[in-house]
Image: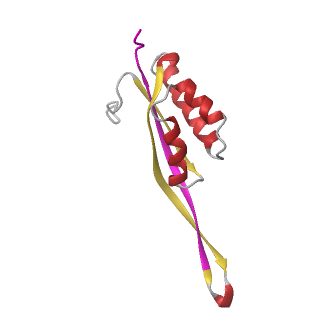
Amino acid sequence: MGKAKRERVLKDSEAKAVVRNLRVSPQKLNLVAATIRGKKVEKALADLTFSPRRIASSVKAGLESAIANAENNHDLDVDALVVAEAYVGKSIVMKRWQPRARGRVGRIVKPFSNLTIVVREVEETA
């Protein structure tokens, strides 16, 4: 018995990786994701390696996971991969309180984000 196998959402030339619960706001994470959209994976990895932003190392790990998924699970050529999509979603928000003057309270929000990276194999045009 059991469930029927779910149809694959992506095309045969695509692979995906999702990084969940990154401790950064979606707005800041989207700035890093925007730097790798549409680039070849070698260039994107180099950009993330030398990026000054704190979260760039986590984005790089997610991109490496997508590359590994493409190579091992879908038999795609690593040298022909480009970052087709890199999009950010909201996750949980931790709420904390900071005491302020005269018995008041200051609210501190600590947002988390999700990152989805889709890599696509493109044929080289000579």
Spot the residue most to the front: 126
Residue 112 higher or lower than 3, as above or below: below
- Judge whether residue 108 is colored magenta: yes
Residue 19 placement (x, y as % from top left) = 53, 42
Q: Main secondary structure of the magenta part?
A: strand
**Which of the 4 image quadrants contains residue 47?**
top right
- Identify the magenta region: 106-126
Q: Nearer the viewer, residue 11 or 2?
A: 11
**What residue is rendered at 58% in x and 53% in y?**
24
**What residue is rendered at 45% in x and 31% in y?**
38
**Which of the 4 image quadrants contains residue 85?**
top left
Q: How many marks?
A: 0
Q: Does residue 118 show up?
A: yes
Spot the residue most to the bottom: 102
Residue 114 higher or lower than 1, as above or below: below
Q: Does residue 73 show up?
A: no
**What residue is rendered at 62% in x and 29% in y?**
46
Q: Nearer the viewer, residue 34 or 113?
A: 34
**What residue is rendered at 45% in x and 20% in y?**
74
- Judge whether residue 99 is colored magenta: no
Residue 20 higher or lower than 64, as above or below: below
User: Where does the N terminus fall, quadrant-wise?
Assistant: top left
User: Where does the C terminus fall, quadrant-wise?
Assistant: top left
Q: Nearer the viewer, residue 91 or 59?
A: 59
